[in-house]
Amino acid sequence: MCCKIAKEPLLDRLSDAVMALNLDSDLAHEIMEQVHKPQNALMHQKMQERLAAGAGMAVSVIFWVTFLLVKLWVEKDRYEISLKRALGFTAMEIKRTYFAKFTVITILAALAGIVSGHYLGQSLLGIILRSMGAAGFRFLISGKIVYAAIPFLVFIAAIGAMLPGIGGIGKIKPYECCTERE
């Protein structure tokens, strides 16, 4: 019995110490979470800012490429546009025709981009990254962003570029078709 009494306080003290360690461990874990929570939020915010900047640059590139392509196409068709104007078509009717043509092309190009990106994007980028030494790669796809937001932004940028691009149609004179073609 004497030994039993001596062991109990030792066991009590030991269990108290273990409980204190567990409490300290839980407290330390909570403190670490509170310390890292703002860091994680800041990293998440920086990533969102970078993604938004990248999306803005992509939309800007789409706008300028589309604008220049439309201007080039209108300039290439200058004789035909002038002939249509000489035959009595208004500039607005010709603009509507070109707008419809470019809208169909934009929709088809966006669909082709989505399909090719979905089926070929990960494998092609994986090949490129493996050649640089990266072992594995996988896209984390958000359906709302990939299949709704990005095509919408592409479409808006393309439409925004088409309107000033076809604006030059109104400046083409009907008599230009009668002058010598260069």
Image: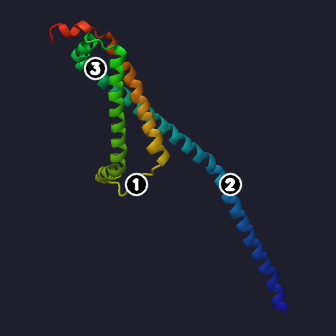
Q: Which is nearer the eye, 42 or 141?
A: 141
Is residue 166 in sight in this rendering?
Answer: no
Q: Which is nearer the eye, 18 or 48?
A: 48
Residue at position x 68%, y 54% in the image = 31
Label 2 vs label 3: CA separation?
65 Å
Q: Which residue is mark 1?
A: 138
Q: Is residue 114 above or below residue 83?
A: below
Label 1 vs label 3: CA separation?
42 Å
Residue 161, picture quadrant: top left
Q: Amino acid at mark 1?
A: Arg
Q: Are marks 2 and 3 in contact (CB under 8 Å)?
A: no
Q: Amino acid at mark 2?
A: Ile
Instruction: Give coordinates of residue 27: x percent, y percent.
Output: 71, 59
Q: Amino acid at mark 3?
A: Val
Instruction: Look at the numbered disc 2 and give the secondary structure of its residue.
Output: helix
Label located before the other in sequence (2 or 1): 2
As drawn, which residue projects farthest toward the bottom?
1
Mark 3 surroundings: few (<14), some (14-19) or many (≥20) residues within 10 A: many
Residue 31's label in the rendered image is: 2
Q: Which residue is mark 3?
A: 74
Residue 67's label in the rendered image is: none
Residue at position x 47%, y 39% in the image = 149
